[in-house]
Amino acid sequence: MQLLGLLCCMVLFTLSSTFTIGRFSRDTSHAIDGEKVMRWDIPFINKDVKTPLVGGDMALPPGRNALIDKAYRWQFPIPYILDNSLDLNAKGVIFQAFETYRLKSCVDFKPYEGEKSFIRFEKLDGCWSMVGDLKEGQRLSLGENCDYKGTIMHEILHALGFYHEQSRTDRDNYVNIWWNQIIPGMEHNFNKYDDSFITDQNTPYDYESIMHYGPYSFNVDPRYPTITAKDPELTHVLGQYNDFSSLDLLRLNRMYNCSAPLTLLDQCSFETLGICGMVPRNQENGVQWVHSRSSSQSPDHTLVGQCRDAGHYMFFSTNSGKAGDSAFLESRTLYPKRKLQCLQLFYKMTGSPKDKLVIWTKQIESDGTPTGKAIATLNGDGDHSWKIAHVPLSMNGKSFYAFQGISGDPSHSSGGILLDDVTLAETRCPSATWRIPNFSSYLASYAVGEYIQSPRFYSPEGYGFGLQLLPNSYVNGYIGAFFHLTSGENDKTMNWPAGNRQVTLTVLDQDPDVTQRQSFSYSFTTNGKQLIPGTDRLYWDDPSKVGTYDPSCDCYRGWTWGYNAFFSHFDLHRRSYLKNDDLILFIEFEDLTPLINQPASNDI
Ligand SMILES: [Zn+2]
Protein backbone atom coordinates (compact mmCIF):
# COMPACT_ATOMS: atom_id res chain seq x y z
CA MET A 1 0.00 0.00 0.00
CA GLN A 2 2.81 2.33 0.94
CA LEU A 3 4.52 1.63 -2.36
CA LEU A 4 1.28 2.28 -4.23
CA GLY A 5 0.90 5.59 -2.42
CA LEU A 6 4.43 6.57 -3.31
CA LEU A 7 3.84 5.66 -6.96
CA CYS A 8 0.67 7.75 -7.05
CA CYS A 9 2.57 10.70 -5.59
CA MET A 10 5.25 10.31 -8.22
CA VAL A 11 2.65 10.29 -11.01
CA LEU A 12 0.96 13.39 -9.61
CA PHE A 13 4.31 15.08 -9.21
CA THR A 14 5.19 14.31 -12.83
CA LEU A 15 1.87 15.69 -14.04
CA SER A 16 1.88 18.87 -12.02
CA SER A 17 5.53 19.62 -12.64
CA THR A 18 5.24 19.24 -16.39
CA PHE A 19 2.19 21.27 -17.39
CA THR A 20 0.00 24.05 -16.10
CA ILE A 21 -3.67 23.33 -15.57
CA GLY A 22 -6.22 26.00 -16.38
CA ARG A 23 -9.92 26.55 -16.62
CA PHE A 24 -10.75 27.31 -20.25
CA SER A 25 -12.23 30.72 -20.95
CA ARG A 26 -14.91 30.56 -23.62
CA ASP A 27 -15.14 34.38 -23.48
CA THR A 28 -11.67 34.80 -24.98
CA SER A 29 -11.85 32.01 -27.53
CA HIS A 30 -13.37 31.19 -30.87
CA ALA A 31 -14.55 27.64 -31.60
CA ILE A 32 -14.54 26.98 -35.34
CA ASP A 33 -16.95 24.10 -34.80
CA GLY A 34 -19.18 25.89 -32.27
CA GLU A 35 -20.56 23.33 -29.89
CA LYS A 36 -20.94 20.40 -32.22
CA VAL A 37 -18.94 17.90 -34.23
CA MET A 38 -18.07 19.12 -37.70
CA ARG A 39 -19.10 16.84 -40.54
CA TRP A 40 -16.40 16.39 -43.13
CA ASP A 41 -18.15 13.62 -45.05
CA ILE A 42 -18.28 14.73 -48.63
CA PRO A 43 -21.91 13.68 -49.34
CA PHE A 44 -23.02 15.96 -46.46
CA ILE A 45 -20.94 18.93 -47.66
CA ASN A 46 -22.17 18.38 -51.23
CA LYS A 47 -25.86 18.07 -50.41
CA ASP A 48 -26.87 21.30 -52.20
CA VAL A 49 -24.40 21.15 -55.08
CA LYS A 50 -25.84 21.93 -58.54
CA THR A 51 -23.02 20.42 -60.65
CA PRO A 52 -24.18 16.99 -61.93
CA LEU A 53 -22.23 14.44 -59.94
CA VAL A 54 -22.02 10.67 -59.85
CA GLY A 55 -21.46 8.81 -56.58
CA GLY A 56 -21.71 12.07 -54.65
CA ASP A 57 -18.48 13.75 -55.79
CA MET A 58 -17.38 12.59 -59.24
CA ALA A 59 -17.93 14.66 -62.36
CA LEU A 60 -17.84 11.93 -64.94
CA PRO A 61 -18.14 12.24 -68.70
CA PRO A 62 -20.39 9.30 -69.69
CA GLY A 63 -18.91 6.15 -71.20
CA ARG A 64 -15.43 6.72 -69.88
CA ASN A 65 -13.80 3.83 -68.17
CA ALA A 66 -11.10 5.39 -66.11
CA LEU A 67 -9.91 2.80 -63.75
CA ILE A 68 -9.28 -0.22 -65.95
CA ASP A 69 -8.45 1.68 -69.12
CA LYS A 70 -4.77 2.60 -68.94
CA ALA A 71 -5.33 5.49 -71.34
CA TYR A 72 -6.65 7.49 -68.38
CA ARG A 73 -3.63 7.04 -66.14
CA TRP A 74 -1.44 10.01 -65.35
CA GLN A 75 2.21 10.61 -66.11
CA PHE A 76 4.09 12.06 -63.13
CA PRO A 77 4.62 14.72 -62.06
CA ILE A 78 1.03 15.91 -62.48
CA PRO A 79 0.91 19.60 -63.50
CA TYR A 80 -1.34 21.63 -61.21
CA ILE A 81 -2.87 25.08 -61.11
CA LEU A 82 -4.05 26.65 -57.86
CA ASP A 83 -6.84 28.95 -58.98
CA ASN A 84 -7.07 32.26 -57.16
CA SER A 85 -10.69 31.49 -56.29
CA LEU A 86 -9.37 29.04 -53.68
CA ASP A 87 -9.38 29.95 -50.01
CA LEU A 88 -5.86 30.57 -48.74
CA ASN A 89 -6.31 27.78 -46.20
CA ALA A 90 -7.24 25.35 -49.00
CA LYS A 91 -4.04 26.25 -50.90
CA GLY A 92 -1.95 25.41 -47.84
CA VAL A 93 -3.79 22.13 -47.26
CA ILE A 94 -3.38 21.13 -50.94
CA PHE A 95 0.40 21.30 -50.40
CA GLN A 96 0.05 19.14 -47.28
CA ALA A 97 -1.89 16.58 -49.34
CA PHE A 98 0.81 16.65 -52.08
CA GLU A 99 3.48 16.00 -49.43
CA THR A 100 1.53 13.02 -48.08
CA TYR A 101 1.35 11.52 -51.60
CA ARG A 102 5.09 12.05 -52.06
CA LEU A 103 5.91 10.50 -48.67
CA LYS A 104 3.82 7.38 -49.28
CA SER A 105 3.79 6.82 -53.06
CA CYS A 106 5.47 7.80 -56.31
CA VAL A 107 2.71 10.26 -57.21
CA ASP A 108 4.26 13.68 -57.75
CA PHE A 109 3.00 17.14 -58.66
CA LYS A 110 4.54 20.21 -60.33
CA PRO A 111 3.36 23.72 -61.21
CA TYR A 112 1.66 23.92 -64.62
CA GLU A 113 3.87 24.94 -67.53
CA GLY A 114 1.67 24.59 -70.60
CA GLU A 115 1.14 20.79 -70.54
CA LYS A 116 -1.94 19.21 -72.18
CA SER A 117 -3.02 17.36 -69.03
CA PHE A 118 -3.32 19.18 -65.73
CA ILE A 119 -5.51 19.57 -62.65
CA ARG A 120 -6.93 22.97 -61.87
CA PHE A 121 -7.82 23.20 -58.20
CA GLU A 122 -10.69 25.66 -58.01
CA LYS A 123 -13.31 26.84 -55.55
CA LEU A 124 -16.58 25.84 -57.24
CA ASP A 125 -19.64 24.29 -55.61
CA GLY A 126 -18.75 21.43 -53.30
CA CYS A 127 -15.87 18.96 -53.24
CA TRP A 128 -15.59 16.92 -56.40
CA SER A 129 -13.24 15.70 -59.12
CA MET A 130 -13.20 14.21 -62.61
CA VAL A 131 -12.02 10.58 -62.67
CA GLY A 132 -8.73 9.71 -64.40
CA ASP A 133 -6.54 11.83 -66.68
CA LEU A 134 -8.88 13.17 -69.36
CA LYS A 135 -5.90 14.53 -71.38
CA GLU A 136 -7.48 17.95 -71.79
CA GLY A 137 -6.91 19.68 -68.44
CA GLN A 138 -9.55 19.19 -65.79
CA ARG A 139 -11.10 20.72 -62.72
CA LEU A 140 -11.04 19.60 -59.15
CA SER A 141 -13.43 21.62 -57.00
CA LEU A 142 -12.72 22.50 -53.38
CA GLY A 143 -15.73 24.52 -52.32
CA GLU A 144 -16.80 25.69 -48.87
CA ASN A 145 -15.61 23.30 -46.11
CA CYS A 146 -13.52 21.19 -48.50
CA ASP A 147 -10.23 22.58 -47.14
CA TYR A 148 -9.56 19.48 -45.12
CA LYS A 149 -6.55 17.26 -45.89
CA GLY A 150 -8.44 13.94 -46.01
CA THR A 151 -11.05 15.44 -48.38
CA ILE A 152 -8.37 16.71 -50.74
CA MET A 153 -6.52 13.36 -50.66
CA HIS A 154 -9.86 11.65 -51.46
CA GLU A 155 -10.58 13.93 -54.43
CA ILE A 156 -7.05 13.49 -55.79
CA LEU A 157 -7.56 9.71 -55.64
CA HIS A 158 -10.64 10.18 -57.88
CA ALA A 159 -8.49 12.26 -60.24
CA LEU A 160 -5.97 9.40 -60.25
CA GLY A 161 -8.73 7.02 -61.38
CA PHE A 162 -10.24 5.56 -58.21
CA TYR A 163 -13.92 5.04 -57.40
CA HIS A 164 -15.54 4.60 -54.01
CA GLU A 165 -14.79 1.42 -52.10
CA GLN A 166 -18.46 0.66 -51.51
CA SER A 167 -19.11 0.56 -55.27
CA ARG A 168 -17.06 -2.63 -55.63
CA THR A 169 -18.82 -5.62 -57.20
CA ASP A 170 -18.35 -7.73 -54.07
CA ARG A 171 -19.47 -5.10 -51.54
CA ASP A 172 -22.69 -6.91 -50.55
CA ASN A 173 -20.57 -9.56 -48.84
CA TYR A 174 -19.20 -6.93 -46.44
CA VAL A 175 -21.69 -4.09 -45.99
CA ASN A 176 -25.45 -3.62 -45.82
CA ILE A 177 -27.10 -0.77 -47.73
CA TRP A 178 -30.28 0.46 -46.00
CA TRP A 179 -32.16 1.57 -49.12
CA ASN A 180 -35.23 2.89 -47.26
CA GLN A 181 -33.00 5.31 -45.27
CA ILE A 182 -31.50 6.94 -48.38
CA ILE A 183 -32.82 10.35 -49.49
CA PRO A 184 -35.20 9.58 -52.40
CA GLY A 185 -33.44 10.20 -55.70
CA MET A 186 -29.99 9.64 -54.18
CA GLU A 187 -30.04 5.84 -54.49
CA HIS A 188 -27.75 5.95 -57.54
CA ASN A 189 -24.91 6.99 -55.23
CA PHE A 190 -24.91 3.45 -53.89
CA ASN A 191 -24.65 1.76 -57.30
CA LYS A 192 -22.20 -1.06 -57.73
CA TYR A 193 -19.89 -1.04 -60.71
CA ASP A 194 -19.20 -4.05 -62.84
CA ASP A 195 -15.71 -5.52 -62.65
CA SER A 196 -15.22 -4.87 -66.35
CA PHE A 197 -15.36 -1.19 -65.37
CA ILE A 198 -13.43 -0.87 -62.13
CA THR A 199 -10.79 -3.10 -60.60
CA ASP A 200 -9.96 -3.71 -56.96
CA GLN A 201 -6.29 -4.41 -57.89
CA ASN A 202 -6.69 -7.84 -56.26
CA THR A 203 -7.04 -6.35 -52.77
CA PRO A 204 -9.54 -7.29 -50.06
CA TYR A 205 -12.57 -5.16 -49.18
CA ASP A 206 -11.32 -2.18 -47.20
CA TYR A 207 -13.54 -0.79 -44.43
CA GLU A 208 -10.83 1.73 -43.54
CA SER A 209 -10.38 3.14 -47.03
CA ILE A 210 -10.30 6.92 -47.42
CA MET A 211 -12.56 6.17 -50.44
CA HIS A 212 -15.31 4.55 -48.32
CA TYR A 213 -18.50 6.44 -47.42
CA GLY A 214 -19.31 6.98 -43.77
CA PRO A 215 -22.38 5.25 -42.28
CA TYR A 216 -24.61 8.35 -42.46
CA SER A 217 -24.11 9.34 -46.09
CA PHE A 218 -27.23 10.61 -47.92
CA ASN A 219 -29.50 9.68 -45.02
CA VAL A 220 -33.05 10.88 -44.54
CA ASP A 221 -32.94 10.75 -40.76
CA PRO A 222 -29.76 11.78 -38.90
CA ARG A 223 -30.33 8.95 -36.42
CA TYR A 224 -30.21 6.12 -38.94
CA PRO A 225 -27.33 5.00 -41.14
CA THR A 226 -27.54 4.19 -44.83
CA ILE A 227 -24.55 1.88 -44.85
CA THR A 228 -23.23 -0.43 -42.12
CA ALA A 229 -20.61 -3.16 -42.00
CA LYS A 230 -21.87 -6.75 -41.58
CA ASP A 231 -19.54 -6.94 -38.62
CA PRO A 232 -20.93 -4.13 -36.37
CA GLU A 233 -17.47 -3.46 -34.87
CA LEU A 234 -16.30 -2.31 -38.29
CA THR A 235 -19.11 0.19 -38.87
CA HIS A 236 -17.18 2.62 -36.62
CA VAL A 237 -14.23 2.78 -39.00
CA LEU A 238 -16.29 3.42 -42.16
CA GLY A 239 -15.71 6.89 -43.56
CA GLN A 240 -12.35 7.70 -41.99
CA TYR A 241 -10.85 10.72 -43.71
CA ASN A 242 -7.58 10.98 -41.79
CA ASP A 243 -5.14 9.43 -44.23
CA PHE A 244 -4.65 6.54 -46.66
CA SER A 245 -5.42 3.06 -45.32
CA SER A 246 -2.75 0.45 -45.96
CA LEU A 247 -4.94 -1.02 -48.75
CA ASP A 248 -5.48 2.42 -50.35
CA LEU A 249 -1.72 2.65 -50.62
CA LEU A 250 -1.34 -0.87 -51.94
CA ARG A 251 -3.90 -0.17 -54.69
CA LEU A 252 -2.39 3.23 -55.54
CA ASN A 253 1.13 1.87 -55.70
CA ARG A 254 0.03 -1.15 -57.78
CA MET A 255 -1.96 0.96 -60.25
CA TYR A 256 0.96 3.30 -60.85
CA ASN A 257 3.78 0.73 -60.48
CA CYS A 258 5.43 2.69 -57.68
CA SER A 259 8.68 1.03 -56.65
CA ALA A 260 9.32 3.34 -53.70
CA PRO A 261 7.86 6.45 -52.10
CA LEU A 262 9.42 9.66 -53.39
CA THR A 263 10.50 11.40 -50.22
CA LEU A 264 10.91 8.57 -47.72
CA LEU A 265 14.66 7.92 -47.62
CA ASP A 266 14.97 5.44 -44.78
CA GLN A 267 13.11 4.02 -41.83
CA CYS A 268 13.94 1.35 -39.27
CA SER A 269 12.15 -0.21 -36.31
CA PHE A 270 15.10 -2.59 -35.74
CA GLU A 271 12.80 -5.61 -35.89
CA THR A 272 14.93 -7.60 -38.33
CA LEU A 273 18.44 -8.98 -37.95
CA GLY A 274 19.71 -6.83 -40.82
CA ILE A 275 18.75 -3.64 -38.87
CA CYS A 276 17.98 -1.89 -42.18
CA GLY A 277 21.60 -1.93 -43.25
CA MET A 278 22.80 0.09 -40.27
CA VAL A 279 26.39 -0.50 -39.25
CA PRO A 280 27.46 -0.54 -35.58
CA ARG A 281 31.13 0.56 -35.55
CA ASN A 282 33.39 -1.18 -33.04
CA GLN A 283 35.49 1.23 -31.03
CA GLU A 284 38.97 0.49 -29.70
CA ASN A 285 37.76 -0.06 -26.17
CA GLY A 286 35.03 -2.45 -27.31
CA VAL A 287 31.93 -0.38 -26.58
CA GLN A 288 29.27 -0.52 -29.27
CA TRP A 289 25.59 -0.33 -30.17
CA VAL A 290 23.88 -3.69 -29.63
CA HIS A 291 20.71 -4.99 -31.30
CA SER A 292 18.61 -5.80 -28.23
CA ARG A 293 15.37 -7.56 -27.51
CA SER A 294 12.54 -6.01 -25.56
CA SER A 295 11.84 -7.27 -22.04
CA SER A 296 9.26 -6.32 -19.44
CA GLN A 297 11.94 -4.27 -17.63
CA SER A 298 13.13 -2.64 -20.82
CA PRO A 299 10.46 -2.52 -23.55
CA ASP A 300 11.21 -1.27 -27.05
CA HIS A 301 9.13 1.49 -28.68
CA THR A 302 7.83 -0.38 -31.75
CA LEU A 303 5.58 -2.77 -29.85
CA VAL A 304 5.51 -1.16 -26.42
CA GLY A 305 2.32 -1.96 -24.57
CA GLN A 306 1.09 -4.20 -27.38
CA CYS A 307 3.08 -7.42 -27.04
CA ARG A 308 5.07 -8.40 -23.99
CA ASP A 309 8.72 -9.25 -24.43
CA ALA A 310 8.63 -8.72 -28.18
CA GLY A 311 10.24 -6.11 -30.37
CA HIS A 312 13.78 -4.86 -30.68
CA TYR A 313 15.74 -1.65 -30.28
CA MET A 314 19.39 -0.55 -30.41
CA PHE A 315 21.19 -0.19 -27.11
CA PHE A 316 24.38 1.61 -26.09
CA SER A 317 25.35 0.69 -22.53
CA THR A 318 26.85 3.45 -20.38
CA ASN A 319 27.26 1.64 -17.06
CA SER A 320 30.79 0.32 -17.55
CA GLY A 321 34.05 1.55 -19.05
CA LYS A 322 35.04 5.16 -18.60
CA ALA A 323 33.45 8.57 -19.16
CA GLY A 324 33.84 9.67 -22.77
CA ASP A 325 33.62 6.16 -24.23
CA SER A 326 31.61 6.40 -27.41
CA ALA A 327 30.39 4.35 -30.37
CA PHE A 328 28.76 5.08 -33.71
CA LEU A 329 25.78 3.48 -35.39
CA GLU A 330 25.84 4.44 -39.07
CA SER A 331 23.00 4.28 -41.59
CA ARG A 332 23.40 2.70 -45.00
CA THR A 333 24.47 4.96 -47.88
CA LEU A 334 21.68 7.26 -49.07
CA TYR A 335 21.13 9.38 -52.17
CA PRO A 336 18.93 12.32 -51.13
CA LYS A 337 17.34 14.54 -53.79
CA ARG A 338 15.98 17.52 -51.91
CA LYS A 339 18.90 18.74 -49.72
CA LEU A 340 16.40 19.00 -46.86
CA GLN A 341 15.47 16.12 -44.61
CA CYS A 342 13.87 15.45 -41.27
CA LEU A 343 15.16 12.66 -39.05
CA GLN A 344 12.57 11.46 -36.56
CA LEU A 345 13.59 9.08 -33.79
CA PHE A 346 12.36 7.64 -30.52
CA TYR A 347 14.99 7.42 -27.79
CA LYS A 348 15.26 6.71 -24.11
CA MET A 349 18.17 7.56 -21.76
CA THR A 350 18.23 5.23 -18.77
CA GLY A 351 21.85 5.84 -17.71
CA SER A 352 23.53 8.93 -16.31
CA PRO A 353 22.05 12.41 -17.01
CA LYS A 354 25.50 13.18 -18.43
CA ASP A 355 25.08 10.64 -21.28
CA LYS A 356 24.74 12.09 -24.75
CA LEU A 357 23.27 10.96 -28.05
CA VAL A 358 24.81 12.90 -30.94
CA ILE A 359 23.35 12.88 -34.47
CA TRP A 360 25.82 13.22 -37.34
CA THR A 361 25.60 13.46 -41.10
CA LYS A 362 28.51 12.45 -43.30
CA GLN A 363 28.98 13.17 -46.97
CA ILE A 364 30.96 10.67 -49.04
CA GLU A 365 33.52 12.52 -51.16
CA SER A 366 34.52 11.41 -54.67
CA ASP A 367 37.55 9.53 -53.27
CA GLY A 368 35.23 7.57 -50.94
CA THR A 369 36.17 9.28 -47.68
CA PRO A 370 33.35 10.52 -45.47
CA THR A 371 33.46 14.04 -44.06
CA GLY A 372 30.99 14.64 -41.30
CA LYS A 373 29.59 17.06 -38.82
CA ALA A 374 27.61 16.75 -35.60
CA ILE A 375 24.14 18.20 -36.15
CA ALA A 376 22.38 17.81 -32.81
CA THR A 377 22.92 16.49 -29.29
CA LEU A 378 20.26 14.89 -27.11
CA ASN A 379 21.13 14.91 -23.41
CA GLY A 380 20.15 12.55 -20.63
CA ASP A 381 18.00 14.20 -17.96
CA GLY A 382 16.98 11.53 -15.48
CA ASP A 383 13.61 11.01 -17.17
CA HIS A 384 13.71 7.37 -18.27
CA SER A 385 10.80 7.43 -20.73
CA TRP A 386 10.62 7.03 -24.50
CA LYS A 387 10.78 10.45 -26.18
CA ILE A 388 10.42 11.65 -29.74
CA ALA A 389 12.98 13.92 -31.38
CA HIS A 390 13.20 15.62 -34.77
CA VAL A 391 16.49 16.70 -36.28
CA PRO A 392 16.51 18.81 -39.48
CA LEU A 393 19.27 17.59 -41.82
CA SER A 394 20.61 18.99 -45.07
CA MET A 395 22.40 16.05 -46.67
CA ASN A 396 23.45 16.74 -50.22
CA GLY A 397 24.68 13.95 -52.52
CA LYS A 398 25.88 10.50 -51.49
CA SER A 399 25.74 10.51 -47.68
CA PHE A 400 24.75 8.72 -44.51
CA TYR A 401 23.63 9.69 -41.04
CA ALA A 402 24.94 8.30 -37.76
CA PHE A 403 24.11 8.07 -34.08
CA GLN A 404 26.95 8.48 -31.59
CA GLY A 405 26.39 7.31 -28.04
CA ILE A 406 28.69 8.98 -25.47
CA SER A 407 28.96 7.65 -21.96
CA GLY A 408 28.87 10.48 -19.39
CA ASP A 409 29.41 8.99 -15.96
CA PRO A 410 29.55 5.16 -15.77
CA SER A 411 29.75 5.15 -11.95
CA HIS A 412 26.28 6.76 -11.79
CA SER A 413 24.67 4.84 -14.64
CA SER A 414 22.63 1.68 -14.40
CA GLY A 415 21.51 1.72 -18.03
CA GLY A 416 22.33 3.37 -21.31
CA ILE A 417 20.84 4.84 -24.47
CA LEU A 418 17.99 3.14 -26.34
CA LEU A 419 17.10 3.98 -29.93
CA ASP A 420 14.04 2.84 -31.93
CA ASP A 421 11.60 3.67 -34.76
CA VAL A 422 13.82 5.92 -36.85
CA THR A 423 12.38 7.67 -39.93
CA LEU A 424 14.25 9.82 -42.42
CA ALA A 425 12.07 11.69 -44.90
CA GLU A 426 12.83 14.51 -47.30
CA THR A 427 10.37 16.84 -45.62
CA ARG A 428 10.51 19.70 -43.18
CA CYS A 429 10.53 18.84 -39.49
CA PRO A 430 7.50 19.94 -37.48
CA SER A 431 8.18 23.31 -35.84
CA ALA A 432 6.64 22.25 -32.52
CA THR A 433 6.29 18.79 -30.99
CA TRP A 434 4.34 18.39 -27.76
CA ARG A 435 4.40 15.02 -26.02
CA ILE A 436 1.91 14.55 -23.19
CA PRO A 437 2.86 11.43 -21.19
CA ASN A 438 0.29 9.47 -19.13
CA PHE A 439 -2.53 10.96 -21.18
CA SER A 440 -5.12 8.47 -19.85
CA SER A 441 -4.71 9.99 -16.39
CA TYR A 442 -5.65 13.42 -17.78
CA LEU A 443 -8.68 11.92 -19.51
CA ALA A 444 -9.72 10.36 -16.23
CA SER A 445 -9.07 13.30 -13.92
CA TYR A 446 -9.76 16.53 -15.83
CA ALA A 447 -13.19 18.10 -15.51
CA VAL A 448 -15.02 19.34 -18.59
CA GLY A 449 -13.41 22.62 -19.62
CA GLU A 450 -10.10 22.17 -17.78
CA TYR A 451 -7.14 22.39 -20.08
CA ILE A 452 -3.46 21.48 -20.17
CA GLN A 453 -1.28 24.40 -21.24
CA SER A 454 1.54 23.58 -23.67
CA PRO A 455 5.00 25.09 -23.30
CA ARG A 456 5.74 28.14 -25.45
CA PHE A 457 6.95 27.25 -28.94
CA TYR A 458 8.39 29.42 -31.70
CA SER A 459 7.44 29.32 -35.38
CA PRO A 460 10.19 29.36 -38.05
CA GLU A 461 9.49 33.10 -38.47
CA GLY A 462 9.85 33.73 -34.72
CA TYR A 463 6.26 34.05 -33.44
CA GLY A 464 5.65 32.62 -29.96
CA PHE A 465 2.61 30.36 -29.65
CA GLY A 466 0.97 27.73 -27.47
CA LEU A 467 -1.89 25.29 -27.33
CA GLN A 468 -4.59 24.66 -24.76
CA LEU A 469 -5.74 21.06 -24.84
CA LEU A 470 -8.99 20.06 -23.16
CA PRO A 471 -8.92 16.30 -22.41
CA ASN A 472 -12.69 16.48 -21.84
CA SER A 473 -14.11 19.17 -24.06
CA TYR A 474 -17.52 20.83 -24.10
CA VAL A 475 -18.55 18.31 -26.75
CA ASN A 476 -19.02 15.02 -24.95
CA GLY A 477 -16.51 12.33 -25.92
CA TYR A 478 -14.02 14.72 -27.52
CA ILE A 479 -10.68 16.38 -26.87
CA GLY A 480 -10.72 20.13 -27.55
CA ALA A 481 -7.70 22.02 -28.90
CA PHE A 482 -7.24 25.80 -29.00
CA PHE A 483 -4.28 27.70 -30.44
CA HIS A 484 -3.04 31.11 -29.24
CA LEU A 485 -0.12 33.44 -29.83
CA THR A 486 2.12 34.28 -26.90
CA SER A 487 4.48 37.19 -26.40
CA GLY A 488 8.06 36.18 -27.07
CA GLU A 489 11.63 37.28 -27.48
CA ASN A 490 11.29 38.39 -31.13
CA ASP A 491 8.10 40.44 -30.83
CA LYS A 492 9.67 43.82 -31.60
CA THR A 493 10.81 42.66 -35.02
CA MET A 494 7.71 40.63 -35.94
CA ASN A 495 4.92 41.83 -38.23
CA TRP A 496 1.59 42.44 -36.48
CA PRO A 497 -1.11 41.35 -36.84
CA ALA A 498 0.04 37.82 -37.72
CA GLY A 499 -2.51 37.29 -40.51
CA ASN A 500 -2.39 34.76 -43.37
CA ARG A 501 -0.59 32.21 -41.20
CA GLN A 502 -1.76 28.63 -41.31
CA VAL A 503 -2.12 26.77 -38.03
CA THR A 504 -1.97 22.98 -38.37
CA LEU A 505 -2.64 20.76 -35.39
CA THR A 506 -1.69 17.10 -35.89
CA VAL A 507 -2.25 14.06 -33.69
CA LEU A 508 0.57 11.64 -34.49
CA ASP A 509 -0.27 8.01 -35.20
CA GLN A 510 2.84 6.38 -33.71
CA ASP A 511 2.89 3.37 -36.03
CA PRO A 512 6.57 2.50 -36.58
CA ASP A 513 6.03 2.48 -40.36
CA VAL A 514 5.51 6.06 -41.50
CA THR A 515 3.63 4.95 -44.62
CA GLN A 516 1.02 3.21 -42.44
CA ARG A 517 0.42 6.15 -40.12
CA GLN A 518 -3.00 7.76 -40.21
CA SER A 519 -2.07 10.92 -38.39
CA PHE A 520 -4.97 13.33 -38.05
CA SER A 521 -4.73 17.03 -38.72
CA TYR A 522 -6.85 20.15 -38.83
CA SER A 523 -5.71 23.44 -40.36
CA PHE A 524 -7.07 26.96 -40.23
CA THR A 525 -5.62 30.24 -41.46
CA THR A 526 -5.50 33.48 -39.48
CA ASN A 527 -7.22 36.57 -40.85
CA GLY A 528 -5.22 39.72 -40.10
CA LYS A 529 -8.38 41.87 -40.18
CA GLN A 530 -10.25 39.70 -37.68
CA LEU A 531 -11.44 41.79 -34.70
CA ILE A 532 -11.79 40.71 -31.10
CA PRO A 533 -15.59 40.61 -30.64
CA GLY A 534 -17.06 43.88 -29.37
CA THR A 535 -13.77 45.80 -29.76
CA ASP A 536 -11.74 47.48 -32.47
CA ARG A 537 -8.63 45.49 -31.52
CA LEU A 538 -7.16 42.89 -33.85
CA TYR A 539 -7.42 39.22 -32.88
CA TRP A 540 -3.93 38.26 -34.09
CA ASP A 541 -2.15 41.39 -32.85
CA ASP A 542 0.87 41.40 -30.52
CA PRO A 543 -0.25 39.42 -27.41
CA SER A 544 1.43 41.91 -25.09
CA LYS A 545 -1.13 44.46 -26.38
CA VAL A 546 -4.29 42.35 -26.70
CA GLY A 547 -3.58 39.34 -24.48
CA THR A 548 -3.56 38.63 -20.78
CA TYR A 549 -0.55 38.18 -18.55
CA ASP A 550 0.19 34.62 -17.38
CA PRO A 551 2.69 34.40 -14.49
CA SER A 552 3.35 30.70 -15.21
CA CYS A 553 5.25 31.66 -18.37
CA ASP A 554 5.92 35.30 -17.51
CA CYS A 555 4.33 36.06 -20.86
CA TYR A 556 1.14 37.36 -22.43
CA ARG A 557 -1.29 34.99 -24.10
CA GLY A 558 -3.49 36.11 -26.97
CA TRP A 559 -7.07 35.01 -27.62
CA THR A 560 -7.54 31.38 -28.61
CA TRP A 561 -8.93 29.85 -31.80
CA GLY A 562 -9.64 26.17 -32.28
CA TYR A 563 -11.97 23.23 -31.97
CA ASN A 564 -14.26 21.94 -29.25
CA ALA A 565 -14.54 18.60 -31.05
CA PHE A 566 -10.91 18.25 -32.12
CA PHE A 567 -10.43 14.48 -31.80
CA SER A 568 -12.77 11.84 -30.38
CA HIS A 569 -11.95 9.65 -27.40
CA PHE A 570 -13.08 6.69 -29.50
CA ASP A 571 -10.50 7.43 -32.20
CA LEU A 572 -7.85 8.14 -29.60
CA HIS A 573 -7.95 4.52 -28.52
CA ARG A 574 -7.71 3.19 -32.06
CA ARG A 575 -4.45 2.56 -33.93
CA SER A 576 -1.34 4.04 -32.23
CA TYR A 577 -2.53 7.52 -31.29
CA LEU A 578 -2.03 6.75 -27.59
CA LYS A 579 0.87 4.32 -27.82
CA ASN A 580 2.78 4.01 -24.55
CA ASP A 581 0.06 6.33 -23.15
CA ASP A 582 1.82 9.24 -24.89
CA LEU A 583 -0.24 11.73 -26.89
CA ILE A 584 2.07 13.41 -29.40
CA LEU A 585 0.95 16.60 -31.14
CA PHE A 586 2.66 18.58 -33.90
CA ILE A 587 1.83 22.27 -34.16
CA GLU A 588 2.69 24.43 -37.16
CA PHE A 589 2.34 28.18 -37.59
CA GLU A 590 3.32 28.81 -41.16
CA ASP A 591 3.40 31.90 -43.36
CA LEU A 592 1.12 31.46 -46.40
CA THR A 593 1.50 34.97 -47.82
CA PRO A 594 3.60 33.69 -50.76
CA LEU A 595 0.52 31.69 -51.86
CA ILE A 596 -1.93 34.62 -51.87
CA ASN A 597 -1.47 35.61 -55.48
CA GLN A 598 0.38 32.88 -57.21
CA PRO A 599 1.46 33.66 -60.75
CA ALA A 600 -0.40 30.42 -61.43
CA SER A 601 -0.98 30.77 -65.17
CA ASN A 602 -4.60 31.56 -64.46
CA ASP A 603 -5.10 33.03 -67.89
CA ILE A 604 -5.46 29.80 -69.83
ZN1 LIG B 1 -15.60 10.54 -53.54
Image (spheres, helix red, strand yellow):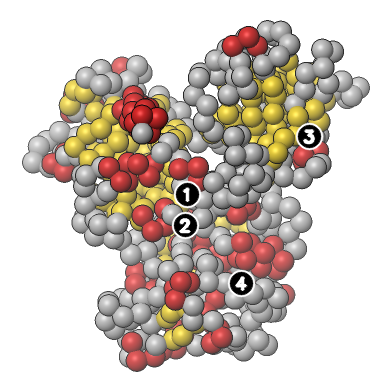
Q: Residue at x 36, y 55 (%)?
A: 569
How far apart marks 2 and 3 lie (CA) works out to 32 Å
Q: Residue at x 37, y 38 (%)?
A: 501
Q: Is residue 445 left or right of residue 514?
A: left
The amino acid sitting under disc 1 is Tyr
How far apart marks 3 and 4 lie (CA) works out to 39 Å
How far apart marks 4 and 1 lie (CA) works out to 31 Å
The disc, 2 or 4, on the residue closer to the chain's N-terminal end is 4
Q: Nearer the viewer, mark 2 or mark 3?
A: 2
| Residue that lies at the very extreme toward the right in this rendered image | 367
480 or 323: nearer the viewer: 323
Residue, disc 3: 278
Q: Secondary structure at mark 3?
A: loop
- Res 116 visible: no
The amino acid sitting under disc 4 is Gly
Residue, disc 4: 161
Question: Ligand 1 closer than 8 Å to the CB at disc 1?
Answer: no
Mark 2 vs 1: CB contact within 8 A: yes
333 or 384: nearer the viewer: 384
Question: Ligand 1 closer than 8 Å to the CB at disc 2?
Answer: no
How far apart marks 2 and 4 lie (CA) works out to 30 Å
Mark 3 vs 1: CB contact within 8 A: no
The disc, 3 or 4, on the residue closer to the chain's N-terminal end is 4
Mark 2 vs 4: CB contact within 8 A: no
How far apart marks 3 and 1 lie (CA) works out to 28 Å
Mark 3 vs 4: CB contact within 8 A: no
Residue, disc 2: 574
Quadrant hosting residue 548? top left
Q: Which x, y percent locates residue 232?
A: 44, 76
Above-or-below relation of 276 to 247: above
Q: Nearer the viewer, mark 3 or mark 4?
A: 3
Q: Is residue 406 left or right of residue 239?
A: right
